[in-house]
Amino acid sequence: MSNSKLKMFTKLYLKDLHEVTAEIMIVVIGVALVTAGFLLSSDQKAPLLIFPLILLLGLAGLLPLISSFKLLSREWSQNTVYLVMSLPVSGAMILGAKMAVLLTQYIGGTLLIALSSYLLYVTKLSQYLTTQQQSLMMLYNNPQLFQSLLAFYVSGLVFLTFLCCTSFFSQIAGKLSAKFSGLVTAVTFIITLILSGKILDALGTGSDELYHMMIQISGDAANYISNMNMSSLSYLVLAIILFILAAVIYDRKLEL
Amino acid sequence: MIEFDHVGKRFGNVQALDHLNLQFSPGKIIGLFGPNGAGKSTAMKMIAGLNQPDSGHVLVDGQKPRQSRDKIAFLPEIDYLYGWWTLKQAADFMRSFYADWDDNKYTELLGFLNLREDMKIGKISKGQRAKCKLLLTVSRRAPYLLLDEPLSGIDILTREEIINTLIRDFREGEQTIIISTHEINDVESLVDEVFFIDQGRIVVSGSAEELRMTKGLSLVEIMKEAFRNVQQ
């Protein structure tokens, strides 16, 4: 009786999730400390804790990219790649499980920070921010603003996916070189990012994204969401292409 | 059957395999012997699909090795298990991937090798790790069992346990075991067929018993003689 692909994927996912426990715990402990800090601090000092939360949000966005390098490179440094490459599964499943872990790390971290921010707002900030509160209430009253924020979050998720796929692709390409693996990885990573930027610029969906966001967040939300979605879609297509390339090289060219 | 057809492999300036031609007969215990750097591990990794030939081709039952990974149980020389795993976690992992995993065999061998499921791979001795690797490899009913230097750096008592496990478990005619090693003494009594390899080429091959009879020498002495001739 053959074993199910889902069961294999789950085993790979759980194994890789264990490998990034330290990075997950950094965000969890950071959020716990800040949350405890504002719950225990005086009402006057509590608003200052919004800055560490913003820093933590940046960390939650950055750590999965660092983990993407760690997850793959550790397989080689600890020789576990002999086990992984001997398994009767495709490179797409091996890399897919790692990608699922990185997305879990990102979504879990950012949602935790969002929850902490909400607690900070409800318990300490609402009394200071009467006007801001009103504008924040637009979240509930103005579905387009809510959609804009959602589009912004999804585009962050897609951009992270793109970066992680670039990381996988460059590391796998680097492993094709026996002597200068690190150098090839770094050069491939930078060149892939530059080329991707040029492709997106040529398609008209790339580097102007932030500019469009600044102009349009206060104006035409529907147009902003449309631009954001187009940009996300372009990054997603590039991410899928890079992922497929990495999986094909893994399956056909990689050697130990 | 495993076949090497004019297989060449080069790493930089080193010719690891040099137009290697060989066929491993099914259902036997086969010794792949030679000094360090002879090309044994390269050949083993090629069968496991971890390496690919520069020229020629390797076939496992008529298929490319990477398409036959479910038929091969490979035990590499290095420690390849996650250090944070317990033996139980490692076994659970393997069970999920291989339909030929045999729980009864695993439980039986666990006791025979004096191992415990709660042992943490990263915290146990080298000898115990070697036994864990062997346990996880032979608990599968894989048609091909590849053991790359399974006795390297292992004390004499553990060596005996490993060899006894292989003898105890071998199903003649059903499973092919290929043992690559430069420590021939330990496995001399185990192998049916031998291939002596040096600088990526076969220098002597044949039935272990026939070689011993015709030359009147042990396999260790045959290897010494063969490599002396190659060096001259």
Image (tube, grey):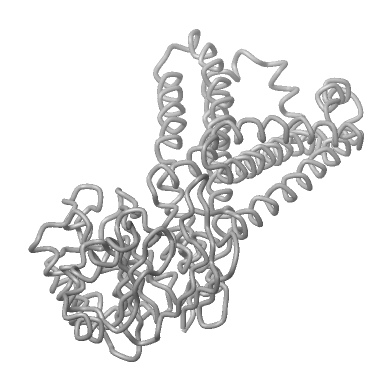
Q: Which residue is drawn at 26% across and 56% down?
A: B86
Query: Is A52 or B90 nearer to us in this picture?
Result: B90
* Position above or below: A184 against A55: below
Q: Quadrant of the C terminus of chain B?
A: bottom left
* Position above or below: B36 against B29: above
* Position above or below: B104 against A253: below
Query: Is B38 or B75 nearer to us in this picture?
Result: B38
Direction left: furthest residue: B157
Q: Where is residue A46 in the image (x, y as percent from the top left)?
A: 49, 14
Q: In this image, B152 relative to B232: left or right?
A: left
Q: In this image, B79 relative to A225: left or right?
A: left
Direction front: furthest residue: B232
Q: Which residue is drawn at 29% across and 58% down?
A: B35
Query: Is B48 or A39 nearer to us in this picture?
Result: B48
Q: Position of residue B29 (x, y in %)?
A: 29, 80
Q: Which residue is drawn at 72% across and 16% down?
A: A131
